[in-house]
Every structure is written in structure tokens, then in C-alpha cells.
Amino acid sequence: MESQYLKQCLGDCLKKGLAEVVEHRPADPIEYLAHWIYRYRRNLDEEKKRMLESAELEQEREAALAELEILRQREEEERMIQQKLEEQRQAELEQQEREKAELEQEREKLELQSEEHNMQLQQEDQKENEKTVSELTDRPGTPAELTDRPGTPDLTKAEEELDQSGQPESQTDLTAEAEESSELT
């Protein structure tokens, strides 16, 4: 049992140390063997320390690689997010342009409708004025008789203005005069 213990703990060390003593044949082999065992122990400790440092460096290297991979993934995700945001912004701009074009078309359509409505109103006013003028001219009697009646416009003034300008007075002016004279009476 003791030999087993010695083989396990000192076997390799003593074999190598005794081989060194035999090879160098020092004057004091015991002191030489003692120093050699101390150096052996120190070398073993340093080797163990180097192995631990090497393992630690390997772990740090793996951790750094893992961190780099995570950073690459994050950059890729960020790039994808930026790309999606850019696509969304572009889609929003296109949508705004479409809406703007639709609003412009709607505005033009409303303007056309408004112009058509105004033209219709003007035509209706013109027809009413023509109707009023035709009613006034279709009544029996002379212009003097018509002006003598209460509430009728003074047509002598209209005739005078017609004679002075050489052109017929606009129908809106005639209606305005008719309204003024009816208000006065």
C-alpha cells in the first residue's frame, strides 16, 4: 500500500529526478535531487497555471465570439427594422400623394360643379329678366300709360337712356329701376 502511494504521488517525479542524478553525477546527489524536485514542483505549478490561463483565455475568446455574434445579430435586426421603417415611410408618403391627388381632383370637380351651378343661376336670372322684360313690353298701352300706374317703373327714363347710349340698357339695370320705383311708391 505504501508503495502504491509512493508510485502515485512521487513515482514520475522520482524517476525523472533519479535519471537526472545518474546523468549528471553531481558531487552531492541528495542536494541536487532536492533542488531538482523543487524546480520540478515549481515547473508543475507554472504548467498548471499556464493551463488554467490558457483555459481561461479560451473561455474569454469564446465569450468574445459569442458577444460578436450577438452584436452582428443586433446589427442585422436594426438594419431590418430601419429597412421596414423606410418602407413604411415610403408607403405613407405614397399614400399622402395619392390622397393629395384625390383631394385635388375632388376640388377641381367641386369647382366645375360650382361654375356649372353659377352658370345655371345666371341663365335662370337671365331668363327671369327676359321674362320680366317681355311681360312689361307685352302689356297693352303706351309707355306713358304704364308709368302712370302706381308701382310701375318710369319707362321714360329707360327710353331716354336707351336713346342716349345707343344700346339697350342691361336687363339687370331695368329690374333694379323697377324695384326702386316700386319701393318709392
Image (tube, rainbow, N blue to C red):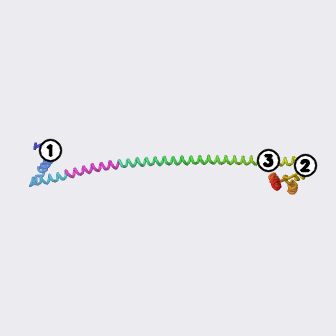
Residue 71 % position (x, y): 39, 49
In screen coordinates, is 185 left or right of 48? right
Q: CA distance from mark 3 to mark 1?
A: 131 Å
Residue 170 % position (x, y): 81, 52
Labels 2 & 1 near each other (Cβ < 8 A): no
Q: Secondary structure at mark 1?
A: helix
Rendered residue at 89%/47% (across/down): 140
The residue lying toward the viewer, choosing from 116 and 23, is: 116
Return the residue at label 3.
Answer: 128
Residue 95 % position (x, y): 56, 46
The amino acid at mark 3 is: Glu
Labels 2 & 3 near each other (Cβ < 8 A): no
| Badge 2 or badge 3: first in the primary sequence | 3
Residue 8, numbered circle:
1
Q: Secondary structure at mark 2?
A: loop
Q: Is residue 32 magenta?
A: no
Q: Secondary structure at mark 3?
A: helix
The residue lying toward the viewer, choosing from 79 and 141, is: 141
The residue lying toward the viewer, choosing from 83 and 121, is: 121
In screen coordinates, is 176 left or right of 73? right
The amino acid at mark 1 is: Gln
Rendered residue at 14%/52% (across/down): 37
**Quick one: label 1, few (<14), some, or many (20+) residues within 10 Å?**
few
Region in magenta: 44-65
**Quick one: label 3, few (<14), some, or many (20+) residues within 10 Å?**
few
Rendered residue at 64%/46% (across/down): 106
Q: Main secondary structure of the magenta part?
A: helix
Extreme-bottom residue of the structure: 164
Which is more foreground, mark 2 or mark 3? Answer: 2
Which is more foreground, mark 3 or mark 1? Answer: 3
| Badge 2 or badge 1: first in the primary sequence | 1
Residue 141, numbered circle:
2
